[in-house]
Image (cartoon, rainbow, N blue to C red):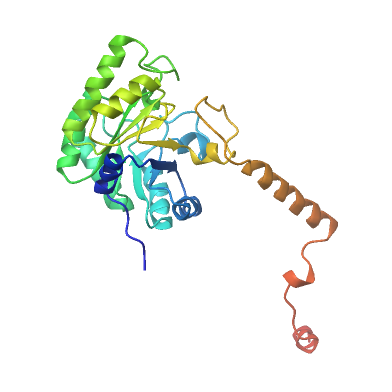
Amino acid sequence: MSAQRLSTLDFREMKQKGEKITMVTAYDHPTAQLVDEAGVETILVGDSLGMVVLGYEDTLSVTIEDMIHHSKAVVRGSERAFVIVDMPFLTYQVTVEDALRNAGRIIQSTGAQGVKLEGGGEVVEAVSAITRAGIPVVGHLGLTPQSAGQLGGFKVQGKDPRVAREMIEDALALEDAGMFMLVLECVPRQLAALITSRLSVPVIGIGAGKECDGQVLVFHDVMGIYTGKRPKFVKQYAQARDEMEKGIKEYISEVRSGLFPEEKHTFSMNEEDLSRAME
């Protein structure tokens, strides 16, 4: 029997009790199984799959078809974790109607439990419409990768008092619009702590300090698989890529030397039957 998935009410209760929430990205069935069985509460199918899985240069190239394809596999591979899907670039920024339609398509097609949108005041109406339709929404403030170019690159956001004030106002507006969780990325820990204390919904940090209600990291960063630039806020908990490369090299060596396959890896047939087959 499948385990019961966590709900938005569970996360609100965890915040009230001071229990930390863990979130890890996943983009396929086996990874989802692994992190779900390990005990994470939330799985994010992030548009970071563009860089770490699909080989794109940024998240802007990720399509809704990409997100749906990978999210379906993640949902099938998980049982308890709450699965959140990033809405990709231009699927919610053009009109509120587009945002609602695309959010609905993602949920209907994948079976995921919620969607995530980047942005502040400019997406409040979209968040409100999506939540009114019964779809849980996660907000995302600070460094928002889809608009990194406009923000001046991948830099810490919120050090300037005006920007910090806007971020606080955006967070409160998103909460009023119905979001059930907020991701803060690359934000000074003092500002993240203030926003976390002001909101009744959980705040998940990535490069935003330990005062947040939880943390999120990209699976390939956690496991030491991704070879691209590693941000300051990333901590590697394993060197899986080294082990994987070692295994592949050993396989190549044994095939070339004739050590693999051994007798135990092969099948055989009766010699008499073989003779008959040759008649």
Q: Quadrant of the N terminus?
A: bottom left
Determine the image quadrant of residue 163. Answer: top left
Compared with residue 74, is residue 219 higher up or lower down, i.e. above or below? Answer: above
Q: State the image coordinates of residue 82 (x, y, percent, origin top left).
A: 34, 49
Residue closest to the far right: 257
Looking at the image, residue 225 sits to the left or right of residue 183; the answer is right
Residue for point 77% across, 64% down: 261
Q: Nearer the viewer, residue 2 or 229?
A: 2
Residue for point 71% across, 50% down: 247
Residue closest to the far front: 17
State the count of labels. 0
Q: State the image coordinates of residue 128 (x, y, percent, origin top left).
A: 17, 35
Q: Is residue 119 visible?
A: no
Compared with residue 163, is residue 89 higher up or lower down, i.e. above or below? Answer: below
Compared with residue 31, is residue 183 higher up or lower down, i.e. above or below? Answer: above
Q: State the image coordinates of residue 196 (x, y, percent, origin top left).
A: 30, 29
Q: Nearer the viewer, residue 92 or 136?
A: 136
Q: State the image coordinates of residue 106 (x, y, percent, origin top left).
A: 30, 46
